[in-house]
Amino acid sequence: MFVVQRYASGTGVELVERGGGYRFSTISALGRHDLPIDAQVRHLLHVAEESIAQVQVASYPPDGRVLLTGQAVVGRLVWPADADVYDRPPYNVVVDGREMTWDEFGRALEPFEGMRLRLVVQDSVDEVRDSDAEVQERPPSK
């Protein structure tokens, strides 16, 4: 489902998987209200296709444990759906459209025990600059 919004700084488009999971967002370059929405939609579809094609976590036999498939993972933080706002539980992590608790995510890191870990937090919204969907480059995730 696409959601289109107008902000003071420009227009935004969000692509949201029903029932949670995947979520991709863009905003037009600062102050650009004339950027065609279809440029942002094309960008989101491209990003979604690339992201969904990458498998970052998988279940492995014999016990079905979920483990990382490589040494890098990209996801997002979400408030647990059943969370009590007064209890303040930790956020969950969504990877490959799959929501995991921090405990489950920690178990997915099991093969890397003893290795160094680098956590990078980035904005989840891509800035689209013109109708050709030129996007501000993100630093590569490693």
Image (tube, grey):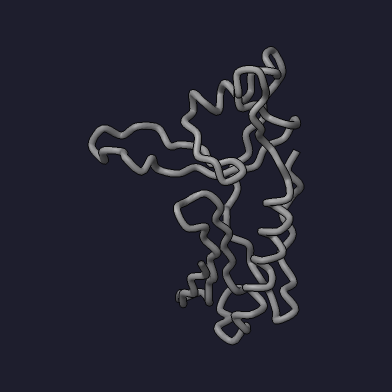
Expressed as whole percent of the image width and height from the top left, the position of residue 63 reads 60, 18
- Is 36 situated left or right of 20 in this image? right
Name the one closer to the observer, 99 or 124: 99
On screen, residue 34 above or below 97: below
**Which residue of the protein is positioned furthest toward the left in this rendering?**
86
**Which residue of the protein is positioned furthest toward the front in this rendering?**
62
**Which residue of the protein is positioned furthest toward the top in this rendering?**
114
Expressed as whole percent of the image width and height from the top left, the position of residue 47 reads 69, 60
Expressed as whole percent of the image width and height from the top left, the position of residue 94 reads 54, 41
Residue at figure coordinates x 67%, y 30% from the top left: 118
The number of discs equals: 0
- Is 101 situated left or right of 88 in this image? right
Expressed as whole percent of the image width and height from the top left, the position of residue 44 reads 64, 66
Residue at figure coordinates x 34%, y 32% from the top left: 89
Residue at figure coordinates x 66%, y 32% from the top left: 58
Q: Which quadrant is home to the C terminus? A: top right
**Which residue of the protein is positioned furthest toward the bottom in this rendering?**
34
On screen, residue 53 above or below 34: above
Residue at figure coordinates x 63%, y 62% from the top left: 126
Name the one closer to the observer, 6 or 20: 20
Q: Quadrant of residue 119?
A: top right
On screen, residue 95 above or below 28: above
Name the one closer to the observer, 3 or 63: 63
